[in-house]
Amino acid sequence: MSDANMVIYLKVWRQANGAAEGKFVDYKVDTVSPDMSFLEMFDVLNNELVKKGEDPIAFDHDCREGICGMCSMMINGKAHGGQLNTTTCQLHMRKFKSGDSIVVEPWRSRAFPLVKDLAVDRSAFDKIIQAGGYVSASTGNAPDANANLIPKTIADIAMDAAACIGCGACVASCPNGSAMLFMGAKISQLAVLPQGEPESAKRTLNMVKTHDELLFGNCTNHAECVATCPKGISMEHIARMNREYTKATFSYFEPKNAGGAG
């Protein structure tokens, strides 16, 4: 082995499907470059497994640029490995030492059923987004740039909330399996803007209702979600979501007996 290579010992969760029994399996990877990302190290391992005629390890990935939120892994008990503002695909092997043992697991949440090995079904997030509905927008000519004046402080809040990539680290890290940091960010990014006002009450009520129906837990302010969020989403968005929910509860009522006699 050259000085440039590292030896890494992995303990990886293997499970054929959600109904099968799972277990940790030990692997040794002795051709790891410090410049590899964590996912590239898994690529090397899977190539070796395929050459041996063994089943490669299933894991989610797509852009590998910290944008898509697919690379969901618990690494040594921490979502995405625990490096500040870093997704698994952005985590490099130089953060480890040659000879290190690393435990890798999937997200653990009843709302994210396991598909295979390290891959889980996170479509529950899509259902929360769908429950939020739409934003009303004019379909006429493009408005003048200054027609809707938005203070920079408000625009910054919306952009910070919109940075959420929906990776699910907040759910996997929360002892309650809550998705309120994710949902708070998605509600907050529209709630502070004038474009999001017309449907704000209905959006908030529907998203919270869907969140609870999908068996996500409640927030009890452990703040593990914030500690492991790769995009640094603030708990302020959970607070804003709670305010929006309280306001919506008292101000929004579905029309009753529509079209009936007065």
Image (spheres, grey):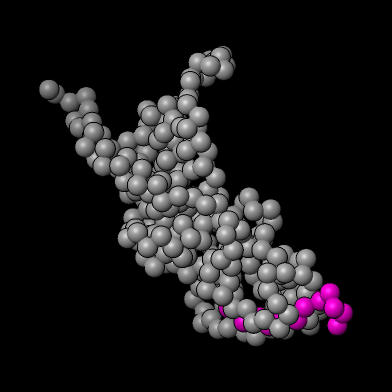
Residue 95 appears at what percent x and percent y?
Answer: 68, 69
Residue 72 appears at what percent x and percent y?
Answer: 58, 63
Residue 136 appears at what percent x and percent y?
Answer: 44, 26
The reply to whether the magenta stretch includes residue 5 is yes
Q: Quadrant of the C terminus?
A: top left
Q: Choose top left, top right, bottom left or bottom right for residue 246.
A: top left
The answer to which of 152 and 79 lies nearer the viewer is 152
Q: Quadrant of the N terminus?
A: bottom right
**Where 13 sits versus 71, above or below?**
below
Q: Residue at x 42, y 26 (%)?
A: 194
Q: Choose top left, top right, bottom left or bottom right for residue 190.
A: top left
Q: Residue at x 48, y 19 (%)?
A: 148
The residue at the far right in this view is 2
The answer to which of 180 and 53 lies nearer the viewer is 180
Our reading of the magenta stretch's main secondary structure is: strand
Q: Does the rendering let one see residue 39?
A: no
Image mark count:
0
The answer to which of 216 and 240 lies nearer the viewer is 240
Q: Is residue 26 left or right of residue 207?
A: right
**Where 190 sits versus 122, above or below?**
above
| First to last magenta residue range | 1-13
**Where 72 sits versus 144, above or below?**
below
Q: Residue at x 51, y 82 (%)?
A: 21
Residue 34 appears at what percent x and percent y?
Answer: 77, 70
Q: Does the rendering let one see residue 148?
A: yes
